Structures are given as structure tokens and as C-alpha cells.
Amino acid sequence: MKKDFSPTLLDFGPIQIYLARHFGFCYGVENAIDIAFRTIEENPDKRIFLLSEMIHNPQVNADLQQRGVQFLQDTYGKQLVNFDSLTRDDVVIIPAFGTTLDIEKKLNQIGIPTEKYNTTCPFVEKVWNRSEQIAAKNYTVVVHGKPTHEETRATFSHAASHTPTVVVNNMKEAIELSKYITGEKAANGFYEEFKGRYSDRFDPQKDLQRIGVVNQTTMLASDTQAIADFLKQVMIQQYQLNNDSIGERFADTRDTLCYATNDNQTAVYGLLDQPADLAIVVGGYNSSNTSHLVELCEEKLPTYFISSEEKIISPDEIRHCDFHNKKEITTTSFLPKKEPLKILLTSGASCPDALVEGVIVKLTSFFPVKKTTEEMTEAFI
């Protein structure tokens, strides 16, 4: 059945809020949080560590820290607690992003079983498994992802253990990579241009003859597909391939696109079909999937990326993230003085629903609304 991606209208009278059909926690995040809190309950007398942030949401991570959980690394892989201080009696939780084989090995050597408290998202593992499958057929893996993101580092590690692997961040980099496929660029330039993003002994002349594209699951699905389609065409032209022979040079990996990320993004397209005055996106400022939802909204109307309702100071002031420049800024007079005021609202896959509800409550508190949030909620139950 065709999915319905049209938003839900919360009509409070002077303010109308269009809520995306799909938003917030995906299965992988819900599963990771459930395992983490259950682990805390089951191990009251043990030190509990998280390899890095459970998910990219400050409220969830703060809650875990308040319960005594310590982070071993920050989101960029910087060590916060030395592995040498760990013992086999400690508990280490692997976050939803997964981790590298090197880190798994270090923990296992200490005597810590990484599989026992592993919250790696099943869809991330699906990407790893698909990478292994195409590696067995002698394809090189091209990972579309942010090079410093935990998930990309983990996917790169797993793919590189089986086959030559390289990471591209966007279409611009994919275009530059294609020039090594066609010979437009000399092979020796590859090592500087993609420094730190290719596997050991990578040979661009040999290893780019057969490729498959997989993704960091929180990237824009449309961007990953566009990169794959572009590189596919490059291979077709370079090797004079037809539909029957394309598989000789290019692996079909469309099944690695995460359904939850794709649904959230498609729901934003449905949201943007509605005429509105502004959009608000809720989520952690370092959340990749959330920033992509912001990008989509920014293309059409004023968009404010906030981490919670606390960032909405008043009807005339909002603190929000300018993720392009990685800083929080203040905007005044962000709510147009009109009725009905129409606002589009969504959140990232690592954002608790309670935060979205908090934003709705805060926004409606500025207006003489016809119904309370509780009454509106009951109408949809």
C-alpha cells in the first residue's frame, strides 16, 4: 500500500501547526535506548560506560550520565576515558551508530564482551552486511557519509576489512572521485585529495574499476541515490556498458537506504506541500539526520533548528542552531504577527516525542487558543 505522507493539522485557532506524518524516534534509536536503560537496571553495582554518545540528543545523553553512565569517547572519537583504565568487570555499551573493528578488538582483549550490550542499529548492520556481500564479488565500497561521524567510521572499518573502501561526503566529492575512474586525474593525486578516507593499500587505478555505493544511514537518501546514479553513469560511459552488463562494474545497493530516515525525509516533503509561514525542526545540534531535515525546509521557508522548547524565549526571540556555521544564534521577531499563523513542525530520529510536545505547548502559550494541547491530543486518539 502507498504510504500517506501528508501531515497532521493541529488547528488551535490563531495558530495552526502542521506536524509531519513521520518524525522522531526510529526503531534503531528506540531499541538502543531500551537496551541502555535496561543495562543500567540490571547492573546496579558495576561501572557502566558508553563508547560514545548513545544518540545525538543532549537530553537523552544527559539522562544517561545522571544515572552514572560515563562516555569513553566524544562524538568525534576523542578519548575521554582511557581504555587502560577499564577492567573485565566493567560494562561497555556500543551505541546505535556501531563501532570500529579496532575498538571491538581492544575491548575484547580487556575481557569486555562487546556483543552483550551492543545497540547497533539493525539498518546500520544491514549496510555492513551488504558491503561484505559485494566485497565477496570484488567490488570496492564507496561510502557516502560524513567522514568524522561515528557511523561512517564504523561502516568504513567493517567495509575496509573485506575490500578497498573510500568515503565521499557529497556529490562534489563523488564528481572528483569519478575523475580517477575516467583517468581525467592522475592517480597520485587521489591520496592527498582523499587523505584519511581510504583503506590501506588503496590503488585508484585498480580499485575503482568495480564499485558499489553504500550510505551512512542518516544522510539524505536522495543524495545517496543521486551519487550512486551519477557514479553508475560514469561506469557505463567509461566501460561502454548496457543494462545487461552494468553489474560487471557497478553493484546495486539501493537496499542499504534506511527506511526510517527515508520516511522522515519523505514526510518533510509532504509537510512542505502545505502553505506556511515558517518551519521548526527539533533535535540535537550534532544530529546528522536532523540537519538534513533542516536543509530540506530551508529550501522553501524560514526554518529554525532548536534542541528543545527552552530555545523559544518569547514570541519575539528564538535561540537556534546555524548548523552551516556550527553555532547557535538569536533571531528576533521570528513569529509573524498574523492570524492564523501557520507553522510546520518535525523532529529528527534521535528526538524524544516529549520535546516535540513541549514545543507545541510553548508555541500555543503565546496565543488565546481554542483548545489545549491535551484536548487536541485526545481528538486524535
Image: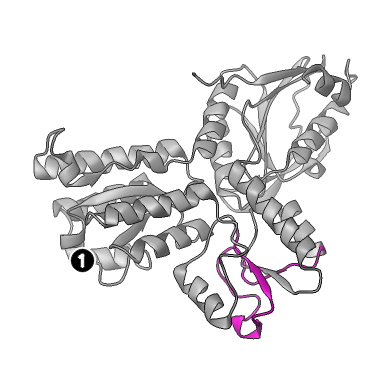
| Main secondary-structure element of the magenta-colored stretch | loop
Residue 168, compared with residue 203, is above or below; it is: above
Query: Considering only vertical position in the picture, is 86 above or below 185?
Result: below
The residue stretch that appears in magenta: 67-95
Is residue 322 depicted above or below 379 in this figure? Answer: below
Task: Tell me, yes or no, whether the highlighted magenta stretch contains residue 72.
Answer: yes
Secondary structure under the numbered disc 1 in the rendered image: loop
The residue that label 1 is drawn on is 203
Lateral position of residue 280 relative to residue 99, left or right: right
At 61% from the left and 17% from the top, the residue drawn is 274
Give coordinates of residue 298: x percent, y percent.
Answer: 56, 33
Dot 1 amino acid type? Asp
Q: Residue at x 66, y 38 (%)?
A: 24
Q: Is residue 131 magenta?
A: no
On the image, the x and y values in percent for residue 318 come to 76, 40
Q: How is the image coloured?
A: one colour
